[in-house]
Image (spheres, coloured by chain):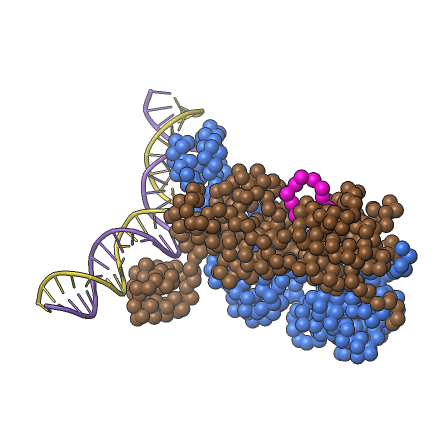
Chain colours: A blue, B brown, C purple, D yellow
Amino acid sequence: MARPRIKDVARHAGVSEKTVSNVLNDYVHVSERTRRVVQEAIDHLGYRVNLAGRHLRSGRSGIIALVVPELDVPYFAELARHVVREAEKRSLTVLIHQSGGDRERERAAVAGFGSDFVDGVILSPLALAPEDLRAHTGPPPTVLLGELLTDGADHVAIDNERAAREATEHLIALGRRRILTVGGRDDEGVGTAQARTRGCRAALAAAGLAYDPASLLPVEAFHMADGAAAVRRTLAEGVRPDALLCLNDQLALGALRALREYGARVPEDVAVIGFDDVEGGRFSVPTLSTVAPDKEAVARVAVALLLHRIDEAARPGLPPDGSDRPGSACPQDRVVAHRLVLRESTEGAVGPDGVW
Amino acid sequence: MARPRIKDVARHAGVSEKTVSNVLNDYVHVSERTRRVVQEAIDHLGYRVNLAGRHLRSGRSGIIALVVPELDVPYFAELARHVVREAEKRSLTVLIHQSGGDRERERAAVAGFGSDFVDGVILSPLALAPEDLRAHTGPPPTVLLGELLTDGADHVAIDNERAAREATEHLIALGRRRILTVGGRDDEGVGTAQARTRGCRAALAAAGLAYDPASLLPVEAFHMADGAAAVRRTLAEGVRPDALLCLNDQLALGALRALREYGARVPEDVAVIGFDDVEGGRFSVPTLSTVAPDKEAVARVAVALLLHRIDEAARPGLPPDGSDRPGSACPQDRVVAHRLVLRESTEGAVGPDGVW
DNA sequence: CAGCCAATGTACATCGATGTAAAAACAGGT
DNA sequence: ACCTGTTTTTACATCGATGTACATTGGCTG
């Protein structure tokens, strides 16, 4: 009553094991009749291939890993959904890992999790340093999401600097001048936060506005709690901005909450804009203006790029070298579209409260 | 320069392959000296076990699947985080699947995804029917989350009926009488929605309030958009409730938005309560009262139960029978704690808007 | 009808790790 | 030194699927 093996199917169909395997793998030279007989045996016994055996033999598991900092950050959850869907189309299974923004865990990810059972890795790094990547050029193939860390690996992202510039220009066009950047970072790092901060500064400079380092509100993490805390802290100090550029929607939603506690009307007193276009921002009070990355495209491009690398690595070609095949061996750098979605938090009012 | 195999380590250490395997698996009868030599060879070569080989030999992959309807529903994302963390503690890896609430996909999950590479499945069903489960009692071991579908499988959930009763009692205690149930369902199904609806009715009955089938607002899915749409529709019809019991926080957050559009003050005009205690409800305006399940406990119990089944299945004992080992062969039914978290949407006001 | 090519099917080795059975090494007791 | 019993190590088969190399079959040509 155990699960049937290929040999059981072979016996049942009266053919050899290899013939069954050939049917399973759509090998061309199998007569229609044999194929039918084998298929019937398969159906009859309820046979299904054992991935362990196939994996051992082929060296491919059909599993790719997606590593994100935290799943319960809606942006990553939405991204994960798209990646899973995209991978499924190409009959790959996705293993989702959470790094918690821990450098050690991210390093483990690019190293293939201390074993070789994933065919490839899509990593959204938070703490990984460029040298970690350089240290590990070997398998498995890796695609990075988010900011460009180094030129050592494939990479997919929106143009964060330009997106931040556009968002800031929008705030400036609304007549806002006292703009704070929630989550902004001034340091030398190569992360998404720094790129967006640069874009913001560029817009300010272009508008002839002074840049004040104090306009950057640092946060621990990009959660609602951090956004709310940072804004509460600043407001408590007596600072009165007229616009907030929040580096993601979670921060922005937390900021909306904090502003409300201080009696500020959004957008009349303070305009707020975020990044990511998550579900929460489409139903908040007020609804949230945001920079919407094409998440579906990010997922599609990332999976395609990764699959390409995997196939490439499987071919007997010159693996570590990389002098031939133009535009293939050298790391790809794909920029995905984004657009500004303007909602109530910068553009309009919800309407009066209490006319029930 | 290929990845080293166990045989390479053996050669390098001057011992047999099995001895290396023994060291790897902490077999007792290995002399201290041999162990040291082998360990040095392992470190020197940077050897790491190949999971494909181990999986093939042992029949265990060390991977469990978590199947949820959608990852971008925050409750499932938070649950996923806990499950992953819990599994990691027991050196299991979690494969996350999304069923999209599709019955076919859920059925595939309990059937082990058409292959046997997962050791077990934790499934949060949405569309699965009891008969689907009964049809597939074979491997892999399965633990269900959410409502009790049948007595055929292990199962972990909060007491949804009681939780809904408590939430409704809270609304009634506030003096509310025109209570609508957003997402409520009256039918004969065995899902979470039905259980919560029953609890609500029980509370109404206990308070001597009439039950009106029209108080159930059906929804397509449990997303913010559905909550907002359902409430808008009802308000447009002229219905004026004084409380909303929303069957999850997403519906509730959508409802808050819709209420605001109609000028209703929450909680003064309408009290709102949800289920799940997601992050969004802790920062919404107003903050959301909710039924908070102990998600960490759900994850912990589910993983423990599953692991137990997996071990059980591996032992040579009487698999399909199940007459011995009391309280083990028979399906477990674990109820996890929940508590009412009362916030502004039922208890207090945010404070006046516009005193900036 | 012999002869040959292509289409089709088979036996066997292989992927890497580990269980089995048995051999080798070692300790202690007489 | 010899036997006994235990520890330590080894050779080999095994898990399931598939690539390789070869055997067989059938169809077609000359």
Where does residue B356 sit, x and y in percent of width and height?
Answer: 87, 72
Left or right of A184 in this view: A20 = left
User: Can see residue B173?
Assistant: yes
Q: Nearer the viewer, residue A130 or B141?
A: B141
Where does residue B41 sit, x and y in percent of width and height?
Answer: 36, 67
A218 shown above or below A94: below
Q: Residue at x 71, y 58 (%)?
A: B290
Q: Residue at x 77, y 73 (%)?
A: A232
Range drawn in magenta: B180-192
Q: Residue at x 74, y 53 (%)?
A: B168
Q: Main secondary structure of the magenta part?
A: loop
Where does residue D30 sit, x and y in percent of width and height?
Answer: 40, 25
B106 shown above or below A321: above
Left or right of A133 in this view: A250 = right
Where does residue A236 sit, x and y in percent of width and height?
Answer: 79, 77
Q: Residue at x 48, y 46 (%)?
A: B330
B182 shown above or below B7: above
Left or right of A332 in this view: B16 = left
* Quarter occupied by the N terminus of chain B: bottom left
In the rendered image, residue A62 lying in the magenta stretch gets the answer: no
Q: Nearer the viewer, residue A193 or A209?
A: A193
Q: Nearer the viewer, residue B17 or C21?
A: C21
In the rendered image, residue B189 lying in the magenta stretch gets the answer: yes
